[in-house]
Every structure is written in structure tokens, then in C-alpha cells.
Image: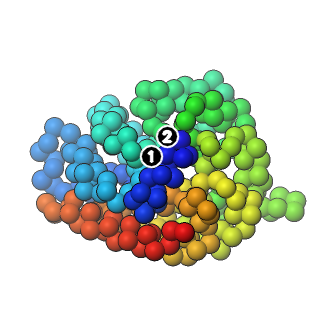
Amino acid sequence: MTKEELIAQIRLKKSYLCVGLDTDITKIPRHLLSHADPVFEFNRQIIDATKACCVSYKINTAFYESQGIKGWDAMEKTVNYIPSTHFTIADAKRGDIGNTSAQYAKAFFDVLRFDAVTIAPYMGEDSVRPFLEYKNKWSIVLGLTSNSGAKDFELQQVGEEKLYEKVLQTVAKWGSTENLMFVIGATRADEFIHIRKILPNHFLLVPGVGSQGGSLKEISEKAMNKDCGLLVNVSRAIIFAGGEENFAEEAKHTAEQYQREMSTYLK
């Protein structure tokens, strides 16, 4: 998906909502466990219920990889089921030496056909470059995360700047606003104005709204640019909004609430 196509969907739906399919098989409604593929059936119903409210789906691959071959099968069926109008993200946080990254890129872009994959940039440009070689595909690089461990490296002072600032400034030179996004955690709202000075035109993937406590209003006011420039991910608060047979309806209701609020912030 191109940047122009993504922006068009945001404008059309008046939404920059990304629904996170962090599908934990131990948390899905019990009546689904009788299905041949309970995880896919859960995802299918969530997608059908929320697709009108969101522009993107993010699949956290850990929840699928942990289930072995059945999990990979569910993940592939899920990404193939998502409408082509929606931006698909493999939240895999890959990043290794060049030839290994090339295989990761092949797995997520050629085989599974995601639009984007999250990447850890610690090993440098040659570990990210193979992902950037794909046309109309996106590398979403970890910038500033919400977890408490961010203080161990990301927020450490390195000379006159923090390490995460160095990462943003350096990685931005490897690609363009057409193929690079950055992960910025929602609970780091105080940093967004400064981050927009470093990255005025890039899209930001923002997890941490909902169950983790990030403020959609604060993020939107501080980080939105002329193209919107945001994909705000909400996972558990939507997909596990209800735990009974009406779980999909509850997910739809919650997603609609986010979409309505987002429509008020869009410029």
C-alpha cells in the first residue's frame, strides 16, 4: 500500500485506527474452541465487525508463533482475509544481519504479503536495508516505546541527545516518508511535540492507547500532521471488549467509539 492510498483511506473513513490482533487463544470465548481453527475464527469475526471503523490491522506475531504450525497457518489465513483496503502490519520486531533480514523480509512481504513489518534497528542500516528494498512496503522502526525498560537504552543521554533521538534522525536518512514509519508509544505523549520536530512528515505507529492508558486526545493534538501521520493501535480494549458469544458486537461498539473520537481530531 502506498502512502497516498493510506491517506485516502484515513480521509474516507475519518479514522486512523489500527486494530491489534493480539489473539491469545486462552482469552477467546470458549464457544470458539470447537472450531477447527479457533484463532482464525475469532479474527474473522473481529475483522468483519471492525473493518468499517479502522484503516489497519496489526498482527502481533508472537501470539501465533507460540502456537507452532497451527499458529502460522492462522496468521496466514488472517492476513489473507483482511480486505486489501486495509494496511496490514506484522508486529514481528525483526532485525538481524543483512542476509538474515532478507529472509525475514521475504517471509513477511512475499510469503505472508503484509504491507509492513516492525523492525528493531539496533544492528544498524544493513539489518534494515533488505526491508526497504521492497516497493510499496513499509519498515516500521522502533523509536520510543512505552515499556519501563525504555529507560535502559532509548532514554539514555548520548552526548547532547537521547539515544532514541539519534535512532530517529539516523534511520530517517535510510528511507523516505513513503516507506518508513516509526513506533512511538502512546504513554510518551510529552515527547510527541519534540518528535514531530525530528520527523515532521513520517507516519507514526502509536501503540499503548486503551488498556495501557495512553490518551488518544493528547496524542492527536500533539502528533497529528497535515496528512494525519498517525496509526493509533488499540488491541485488547477492542478485541477483548466482550468475552461471550456477542464478542464481535462488543468489539464493533468499542471500535466505533474510537472512530467517532478520531473523526473530531482529523484536520
Provide the residue designation for mark 1: 87
The vertical placement of 191 against 69, above or below, is: below
Tag 1: amino acid: Phe
Provide the residue designation for mark 2: 1
- Counting from the top left corner in percent of width and height, residue 240 is at 29, 62
- Taking the view exactly as shown, the residue that stands out farthest to the right is 159
Question: Could you tell me how far apart the alpha carbons at marks 1 and 2 are, in whole angstroms?
Answer: 7 Å
On-image quarter of the C terminus = bottom right
- Counting from the top left corner in percent of width and height, residue 230 is at 54, 59
Q: Please indicate whether residue 228 sits to the left or right of residue 86 in the image.
A: right
- Tell me the number on the disc at residue 134: none
| Total numbered circles | 2
Tell me if label 1 and label 2 are in contact, CB under 8 Å: yes
Q: What residue appears at the point 70 percent right and 59 percent down from the top-left corner?
A: 200
Which secondary structure lies at badge 2? loop
Q: What residue appears at the point 65 percent right and 74 percent down from the top-left corner?
A: 190
Tag 2: amino acid: Met
Q: Nearer the viewer, residue 103 or 226?
A: 226
Q: Is residue 154 visible?
A: no
Q: What residue appears at the point 49 percent right and 40 percent down from the top-left corner?
A: 1
- Dot 1 surroundings within 10 Å: few (below 14), some, or many (20 or more)? many
Q: What residue appears at the point 83 percent right and 58 percent down from the top-left corner?
A: 158
Q: Is residue 51 visible?
A: yes
- Dot 2 surroundings within 10 Å: few (below 14), some, or many (20 or more)? some
- Counting from the top left corner in percent of width and height, residue 204 is at 59, 56
- Counting from the top left corner in percent of width and height, residue 123 is at 70, 39
What kind of colouring is applied to the model shown?
rainbow
Which secondary structure lies at badge 1? strand
Pointer 1 or 2: first along the chain? 2
